[in-house]
Each structure stands twice: as structure tokens, then as C-alpha cells.
Image: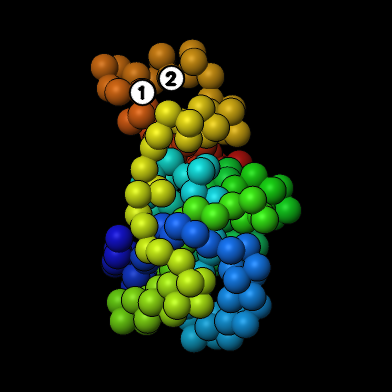
Amino acid sequence: MLYFFEEFNVYVEIAGFKGVSFERADVYLKDNRKVELQKVWVQFFNSALIATCDHLYFAVLNALYAFKNNVNFSKNLAVETLLYASSQHQIQRAIQLIGLNADVSEVAVVVIGESAEQVKDVLNDLAVCLQAELCDDVLCLTPKKVALIKQVFSITPLMVEVAARGHSDDLVLVDLVIEKVALLAASV
């Protein structure tokens, strides 16, 4: 899904891929570091730990605000987005928690750029390079995914109960993950 963050004058694409090889993703990132020089940033995530597009939307938003306010943890917008999405200060810990590894074949990706065309071109290039199927379904919640997200983000049944206020558990989970993303900014 393509978003425009007017205040920052950037476009953000959040998408999912099925059938991704870790080796291809790693090669893509190494071969395309120059894309960053063109003001396009790409970040991969283990989609099993992403609580819908909203999770990544707010991670990007917080990363953009961090750079705007000079309170960023990293020097790279893609890495800053990873830090916020994982609600971690340390890059290595963030990668271990929600980054890619050899066991991951369903991937969420964020592409940030200055124009919609640039972002779409990079997403299309990704699909070709990864030889993977574009599939936003990997961003949806499933019972297995919900259990894993609760475990990794330390979301307790009591937290869900307190936050529920008549909403479904899935919506509450997304809200609680977004709250953890926002709390990283508060810890600066």
C-alpha cells in the first residue's frame, strides 16, 4: 500500500512477499546500497512479527519524526524504521527480533522515497530480484502470528484485557504494538 507523508514529502510503500530467499534479499541489499544515494530506502522485516501495515506505517512515521527532530538512533532511515518497528534501541537486537534470517520466506518490506514513481520502481525491481510473489496477505494477522507477536513484544493477557474496551483482540494487539513503537520515541 502506498502512502504519502505530506509533512516529510516522502512516499512509503508497505508490501509483503512470499517465497523470498534470504540469500536473494541479502544480495539485493548489498547490490543496491547506491539506491540510498538516490533518496530511496528499503527495509525488510520478518512478516510473522509485523502486526499489519499499521505497525510499519507508525514505525516509519516515528523514524521520520526522529530524523526531523535530530533524535534518531541510527544514521539511516531504513534502519531507524527497523528500530521503531522492533521497539528496540540496538540495531543488532532489532535485526534478531524482526529482521530477516535464513528461516524467513514471508517478508514485509518498506520502501521510502521522494516520489511515487521511484518507490514503485524499487518495489518492482525488488519483485524481479527476489523472484518472489508480491503478497500483502503476509501482513495480515493469523492466530499463530498473534501468539508470536504477543510473545516477542511481551504483550500479556492483562494488557490486552485492559486495552480491549470492547474491541477485538486483533485490533487491540495492533494498538498495543503501535504503542510500544511510540514508546521508543519517548525513551530518547
Question: Residue 32: image x %, image y %?
Answer: 58, 81
**In this orientation, which residue lies closer to the viewer: 76 or 35?**
35
The amino acid marked with disc number 2 is Val
Residue 57, visible in the rendered structure? yes
Q: Residues within 10 Å of mark 1 (few under 14, many from 20)?
A: some
**Relative to 72, residue 155 above or below:** above
Among the 4 quarters of the image, the one containing residue 100 = bottom right
Q: Residue at x 55, y 80 (%)?
A: 36
Closer to us: mark 1 or mark 2? 1
Q: Which residue is label 1 attached to?
A: 169
Give how far apart the Cα atoms at labels 1 and 2 are.
7 Å
- Quarter holding the N terminus is bottom left
Question: Residue 117: image x %, image y %?
Answer: 31, 81
Q: Is residue 111 left or right of residue 4?
A: right
Question: Residue 185: image x %, image y %?
Answer: 54, 46
Pick whichever of labels 1 and 2 is earlier in the sequence.
Answer: 2
Disc assigned to residue 136: none
**Relative to 130, residue 185 above or below:** above
Pointers 1 and 2 in contact (C-beta within 8 Å): yes
**Relative to 74, residue 50 above or below:** above
Among the 4 quarters of the image, the one containing residue 115 = bottom left
Tally of marks: 2
The amino acid marked with disc number 1 is Asp
Q: How is the image coloured?
A: rainbow
Q: Residue furthest left?
A: 166
Q: Which residue is label 2 attached to?
A: 160
Q: Is residue 154 left or right of residue 13?
A: right
**In this orientation, which residue lies closer to the viewer: 181 or 50?**
50
Q: Residue at x 48, y 31 (%)?
A: 144
Question: Residue 119: image x %, image y %?
Answer: 37, 76
Element type where label 2 sits in the image: helix
Q: Residue at x 43, y 29 (%)?
A: 143
